[in-house]
Image (spheres, rainbow, N blue to C red):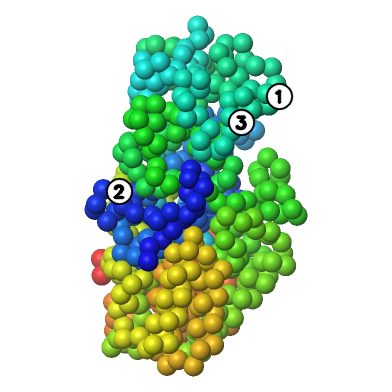
């Protein structure tokens, strides 16, 4: 068995296999445009990449995950709407520089992603930091005859020169031309041509000089082509995004990259459907969006939203409502209660707690290329960073009974069947009703949570009624070694977090840090502590 995903390019489910014979899958995911907070609809899209990554890791494959940060150039589709760069609009509205806008909202994105246990990417390339790569591609496209420059300094991709245009989305050039709803820019050869590089108008804040075209800034689509090629090469295994990325964004990426390399950049394109609110797509422009922090402020565990997303396959629309969220929260609490009732895992023997795959925040604006399974982590954890790449799907590390193995295989089959997470979740819930030995049953559920990502390891032996435990020691065994006064500060901080007094909680974190106590807030409401340097 291996993971099979529906490839938008081929219109069929295909196995995800390493292309280079090194047991590594390279994945590029379209990330946030950091001009406003990410909403939970965005997080559902990003969850798709997280689930793919977790399943591949569960199969013992290494994953290199790149997720871009768009901090310049993301305009509405110029075919139909000649709107402004959203970063600059936000800067004007908030009376901040574009760099300040990008930094603030990127920081918020990483914090929000951690709340729903999304593993941070290994690379977070920002558009503004990769202008040379973009300019190189644009120049090469022009030199090869796939692009043309206007006298004013805008460079367009000439779609008529690329015979395969439309193969991802199914669009045809005739249909695009007929459907063009606004007056065509006079400097375009064809209404369907799209901008690679835009001339900078008078007074534009963010722009770059070029030798060929004067001052300008990149189009939206060129950033992903350039950054994917920079970090993953000309050909890689997976490209993910929302269904709204199929056209024009991913279609244009293919045209740009394939024109230079002779091959489609990704073997598979996988797209997640929309999250709906009152029957409408959740979107910043529609004003019907909700942040994950708002759920937390209302007393809802953010992981209840993750659970809700697991109840629908990624290729299906998902309706979000207060009722559906409450039902998901109740189901998650029930799952935790059943697991808690099994008691804590033994300290030794085959049924010790299996390794957890827990995300932490990537921290503010991570830089460089991270190593390891968990990607960028603001606070490294030796225990969690030691998650070993083993084929847990086919070779469980414990002596499962026949019934236990059947449940495990049912779970894996659901994962491999185009990420059928509803069926996978149903298998785990059914397992908890099966009269297996409690140690085996607990191991099965906690092992599965390496994919589900519901933070269930924190529940095993913790307070099921609250869904959380008090501060616990990370890593080292034996009696606590807290410095004087730290225990009282930990207790006060737990109370502040329960009361959602996050300002006081942050102050207490700083006070504990001054005593040499480092804290790690885990999904599920658990806080772990350790002594710095221990």
Instruction: Left or right? Give the position of 284 relative to 408.
Output: right
- Residue to which mark 2 is pinned: 19
Question: Given this view, does label 2 or label 3 mark the residue nearer the observer?
Answer: 2
What SS does tag 2 mark? loop
Q: Which mark is residue 76?
A: 3
Question: Which quadrant of the view contains residue 305?
Answer: bottom right
The answer to which of marks 2 and 1 sits earlier in the sequence is 2
Q: Residue at x 71, y 45 (%)?
A: 287
Q: Are marks 1 and 3 in contact (CB under 8 Å)?
A: no
Q: Residue furthest right?
A: 278
Question: Given this view, does label 2 or label 1 mark the residue nearer the observer?
Answer: 2
Q: Nearer the viewer, residue 201 or 363?
A: 201
**Residue 306 location (% of width, % of height):** 55, 64
The answer to which of marks 1 and 3 sits earlier in the sequence is 3
Q: Quadrant of the C terminus?
A: bottom left
**Residue 11 location (% of width, % of height):** 52, 47
Q: How far, Cα to Cα, is label 2 from label 1?
A: 41 Å
Q: Residue at x 43, y 19 (%)?
A: 146
Q: Residue furthest top?
A: 151
What SS does tag 1 mark? loop
Mark 3 Cα-neighbour bin, 10 Å: few <14, some 14–19, many ≥20? some
């Amino acid at each position: 068995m291996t993971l099979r995903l529906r490839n938008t390019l081929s219109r069929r489910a295909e196995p995800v296999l390493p292309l280079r014979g090194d047991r590594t899958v390279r994945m590029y995911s379209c990330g946030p445009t950091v001009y406003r907070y990410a909403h939970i609809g965005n997080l559902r899209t990003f969850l798709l990449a997280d689930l793919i990554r977790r399943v591949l890791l569960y199969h013992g494959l290494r994953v290199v995950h790149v997720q871009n940060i768009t901090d310049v150039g993301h305009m509405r589709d110029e075919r139909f709407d000649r709107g402004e760069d959203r970063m600059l609009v936000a800067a004007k509205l908030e009376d901040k520089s574009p760099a300040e806008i990008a930094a603030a909202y990127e920081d918020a994105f990483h914090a929000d992603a951690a709340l729903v246990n999304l593993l941070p990417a290994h690379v977070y390339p920002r558009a503004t930091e990769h202008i040379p790569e973009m300019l190189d591609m644009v120049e090469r496209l022009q030199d090869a005859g796939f692009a043309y420059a206007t006298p004013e300094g805008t460079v367009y991709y000439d779609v008529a020169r690329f015979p395969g245009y439309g193969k991802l989305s199914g669009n045809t050039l005739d249909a695009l031309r007929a459907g063009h709803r606004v007056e065509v820019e006079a400097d375009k050869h064809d209404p369907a041509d799209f901008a690679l590089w835009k001339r900078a108008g008078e007074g534009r804040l963010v722009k770059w000089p070029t030798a060929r075209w004067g001052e300008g800034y990149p189009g939206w689509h060129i950033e992903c082509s350039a950054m994917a090629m920079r970090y993953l090469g000309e050909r890689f295994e997976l490209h993910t995004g929302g269904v709204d990325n199929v056209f024009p964004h991913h279609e244009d990426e293919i045209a740009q990259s394939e024109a230079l390399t002779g091959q489609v950049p990704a073997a598979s394109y996988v797209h997640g459907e929309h999250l709906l609110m009152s029957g409408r797509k959740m979107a910043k422009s529609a004003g019907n969006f909700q942040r994950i922090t708002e759920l937390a402020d209302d007393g809802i565990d953010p992981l209840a939203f993750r659970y809700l997303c697991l109840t629908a396959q990624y290729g299906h629309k998902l309706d979000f409502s207060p009722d559906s969220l409450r039902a998901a929260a109740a189901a998650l609490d029930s799952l935790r209660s059943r697991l808690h009732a099994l008691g804590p895992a033994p300290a030794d023997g085959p049924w010790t707690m299996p390794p957890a795959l827990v995300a932490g925040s990537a921290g503010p604006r991570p830089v460089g290329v991270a190593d390891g399974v968990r990607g960028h982590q603001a606070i490294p954890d030796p225990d969690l960073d030691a998650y070993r790449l083993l084929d847990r799907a086919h070779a469980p590390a414990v002596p499962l009974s026949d019934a236990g193995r059947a449940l495990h295989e049912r779970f894996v089959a659901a994962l491999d069947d185009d990420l059928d997470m509803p069926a996978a979740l149903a298998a785990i819930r059914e397992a908890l009703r099966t009269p297996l030995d409690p140690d085996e049953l607990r191991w099965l559920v906690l092992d599965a949570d390496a994919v589900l990502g519901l933070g269930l390891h924190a529940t095993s032996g913790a307070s099921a009624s609250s869904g959380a435990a008090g501060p616990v020691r990370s890593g080292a065994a034996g009696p606590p070694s807290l410095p004087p006064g730290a225990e009282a500060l930990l207790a006060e901080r737990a109370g502040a977090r329960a009361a959602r007094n996050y300002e006081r909680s942050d102050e207490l974190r700083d006070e504990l840090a001054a005593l040499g106590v480092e804290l790690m807030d885990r999904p599920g409401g658990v806080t772990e502590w350790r002594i710095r340097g221990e």
